[in-house]
Image: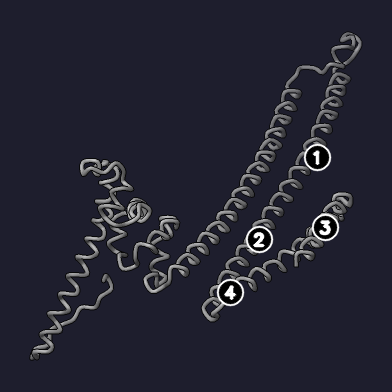
Amino acid sequence: MNNSIAITQPENITNEQSEALALHQRILVNANMAVACWTETCKDLKRMRDAKLYTALGFESFSAYTEQALGIKERQAYTYIQTLEKLGSEFLKQNADIGITKLSLLTAVPVMERQELVDNNDIAGMSVAEVKKLVAENDGRGEQISLLNEKIEGLIEESDEKQKDIDYAEQRIAELEKELEQERNKPTVTEVREIEVSKITDEEIAEIKAKAEDDIRREFEAEKKELKKQMSEEKKKAVEKYKQQLADLDTEKREILERAAELEKRLAVTSSPETVKFTFYFDSLQNDYSKLFESLSKIKTENPEVAAKYSDALSKYMQMMSAKL
């Protein structure tokens, strides 16, 4: 009774009020004792099993001990033990009013999400079937978010690879600039060494050197310009693609959250969960079909042969589904 309200004692108390207050205090004490005993029972069952102390009582197995000495099935005893192991004694004490069956279902919920699930839902007031459904829906949303996070990480890795290509291009430009500087510092060029020095003038030597440097400079500038152009185009494409993919992911994530919210609203106002589930899945199927045909249309533009194979496979699948219906 963790959420009980404190009751103050009136100044002029009647006999009936005195009896009611005493009875109320006994109820609280007994309830707290029941919670403590229930948690300790889980601990003691675990100790009896782990240390095999049941053999000291003349039982050959833990199953024989639970069924003969305690009057419960071994599976029920293991439900108590596993619930304690996975949830911890503190969680059991705080949520003892939920009951062992529903607490055992909560062991499937990740630790970081478990308390939030309990805080946001009246687990104690729900049926076992409703708790099972709530846990299943929580697992489904967790998987969808995990997939979205994996896609985002993949896009980030792809962006890092593009950045490496850009860094390499910039490094190559720096190397070419260094090579040009080295050429400029050479005393003569190859063509000058092949000419008889005694037959040329200083002006002719300077002209040959200038021409060679101009040729090297033009070649270098052309290569540098081309590298910068390629680098700029690749970087722009990579950034645009990354932005588009992130936008698509945001849209997809928003759609998933909207669907989940719509499903929760429908579940709150209908008495037929299966009807809500069918409507939700049918809406999702229609949305996915629209995206599927949009993707197929793009494939037809890029590779008609592959698109024809996909179209044939999709047609066969739809015929098979139609036959089942």
Q: Secondary structure at mark 4?
A: helix
**Which dot marks residue 250?**
none
Give the crowd class for mark 2: few <14, some 14-19, many >=20 residues within 10 Å. few
**What residue is drawn where x is 27% and y is 70%?**
2
Give the crowd class for mark 3: few <14, some 14-19, many >=20 residues within 10 Å. few
User: Residue 1 occupies which quadrant of the picture?
Assistant: bottom left
- Judging depth in this view, the residue of 199 and 103 nearest the camera is 103
Say which label, 1 or 4, has the lower sequence index: 1
**What is the C-alpha distance between the residues marked 2 and 1?**
31 Å
Q: Secondary structure at mark 1?
A: helix
Q: Which residue is mark 2?
A: 247
Can residue 254 be seen by looking at this rendering? yes
Identity of the amino acid at label 2? Ala
Say which label, 2 or 3, has the lower sequence index: 2
**What is the C-alpha distance between the residues marked 3 and 4?**
32 Å
Q: Which residue is mark 4?
A: 262
Can residue 87 be seen by looking at this rendering? no
User: Does residue 201 sit above or below 23 in this rendering?
Assistant: above
Identity of the amino acid at label 3? Lys
Q: Position of residue 196 (x, y in %)?
A: 89, 9
**Which dot marks residue 226?**
1
Mark in the foreground, 2 or 4: 4
- Judging depth in this view, the residue of 23 and 89 nearest the camera is 23
Q: Position of residue 83 (x, y in %)?
A: 35, 55
Mark in the foreground, 2 or 3: 3
**What residue is drawn where x is 25% and y is 60%?**
38
Q: Which residue is mark 3?
A: 316
